[in-house]
Amino acid sequence: MMEIESLRAVAVGALHGVDTAIIVYFLVLNSFYAVLLLLAIPELMEHWRISDDRNLGLLRGADVIPPISVLVPAYNEQSTIVPSVLSFLTLEYPHLEVVVVNDGSTDRTMELLIAAYELYEAPAAYPHVVPTAEIRGYYRSKVYSKLTCVDKANGGKGDSLNAALNAARFPYVLAVDADTLVERDALLRLARPFLLGEPVAAVGGTVRVVNGSTVKHGIVTDARVDSRWLPGIQTVEYLRAFLFGRLGWNRIGGSLIISGAFGLFKQEHLQAVGGYDTGSVTEDMDVVVRLHKHLRAIGSSDAVQFIPDPVAWTEVPATLSGLHRQRERWHRGLIATLIAHRDVCFNPRYGRLGFVAYPFFLFGEMLAPAIEMLGYAAFGASLLFGIADPEFALLFLLVSVGFGFLLSLWATVLEEVSFRRYPGMRDFLLLVWFSVIESFGYRQLMVLFRLQSYWKYLRGDRRWGSMEREGFITAADNPVDTFQPSGRY
């Protein structure tokens, strides 16, 4: 009997110790998120002040802004490729070219491109600065002189971006996803640092969710929040990540992530770091970390920035299976990138990158799902032993769930008082509703999805997984955008 009581006492003490550690962990983590939010407010006000049409007018006629090559990797994108490419071709920017790379698609992606843009095969006149998979052919358009298409064997997204990088003629390159719709003036807004005379290595813009919105001629003509719970909650996630998450990092020395769906880079820096890692499943994060290290190594003052008002729209998963594949891959890539570049952690050579940014992503983003699951397990064990602590349960909910709700709600309010891309009251109420329900079921699913990435990383799994697109909701009078949602992702 005494042994049982002793074991019980040990179990109670251990559980209380675990409970305390978990509470402290989430309190510190969410307090850092709150700091990012506070730092984002002056950044947002500054960008808001200089984002008016008068400054855009200066950019339209300025000689200081450089030519830009838009890099578009595409694999099995038949449902969105034609309107997406059209949106890139019609961007409002003085000097622009679009380089589309068909990465060995097995659907009608290349066929649709040839038909829609009257492509013809052209001589191979591009250098191979960065090695890539076999190039099958280069194509030019009879109707758009600034369009180049590269047809190549399948090698993955990073390999496709490298092929596009080789074919790019201009000193700055914009990496986008084929299912991304870039707003007409987004490149002008993204080029604002050039007008201000700031040294730039890379600039990221805001990515928003297109699901539920109407697209015409490659433009989002009616921005709406999707009323379905899965795309709707992801809309809140994207607002939270971009409106204060990445804005706050501007004041701390730059984030480790520029979205692969919408990021501008100086071409010479990308070539200097060897282009994109073809073995990475999150090539966007990996290349930014290598870029930070390269800039430190050469003593460059070029900055990595985020600007909130250039907007690109992307389609997010509308099914749990699609979301599962995406989030597991994202977290697996995060783990792989952080471990590959572990020499950055607490390294004085890298300054705030080594002492703030890297540790946050390592101990915060990477470990968060494991710690949160440990919290659920500890509470379950306390129920099993009959020693459940109501105070721990309440504190755990407050610091892990309640705090997340407040951050989501604040991001929704920031959107409403600043850019208001969703003009209707219905959209605002939907965003509030999704902020409320995100923590009940959806958050726990994300923890489970991300937990699987640890095991897959240890197994050396580098698969991307298939991603089916629903396609854009298009205007009925648009003969080009005649794609109908398939109901799958």
Image: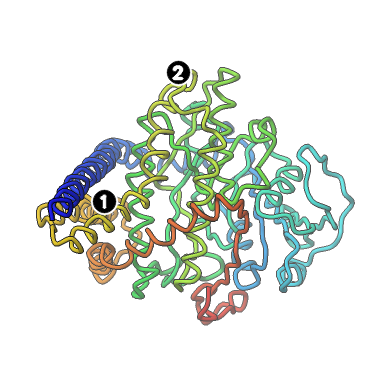
Q: Is residue 21 above or below residue 209?
A: above
- Looking at the image, which residue is at 66% across and 32% down? 273
> In the image shown, does 405 or 62 lie closer to the viewer?
405
Label 2 is placed on what type of residue? Pro
Name the residue that disc number 1 marks: 414
Secondary structure found at label 1: helix
Q: Position of residue 404 (x, y in %)?
A: 25, 53
- The numbered mark at residue 348 is 2
* Residue 153 screen position, x and y as percent: 79, 58
- One can see residue 300 in this view: yes
Crowding at mark 1 (Cα within 10 Å: few <14, some 14-19, many 20+): some
Quadrant of residue 4 in the image? Answer: bottom left
Q: Residue at x 31, y 53 (%)?
A: 374
- Going from the N terminus, do you reach mark 1 or mark 2 first? 2
Relative to 107, is 485 on the left or the right? left
The answer to whether marks 1 and 2 mark residues whose Cβ atoms lie closer than 8 Å is no
Q: Residue furthest right?
A: 123
Residue at 71% x, 45% y is 162
Q: Nearer the viewer, residue 265 or 371?
A: 371
Residue 92: where, in percent of width, then height?
A: 55, 51
Of 317 and 88, the residue lying toward us: 317
Residue 416 visible in the displayed image:
no
Q: Eyeballing the image, is 146 above or below 77? A: above
- The quarter of the displayed image where residue 270 is located: top right
Up/down of 111 relative to 11, above or below: below
Q: Is residue 68 left or right of residue 365?
A: right
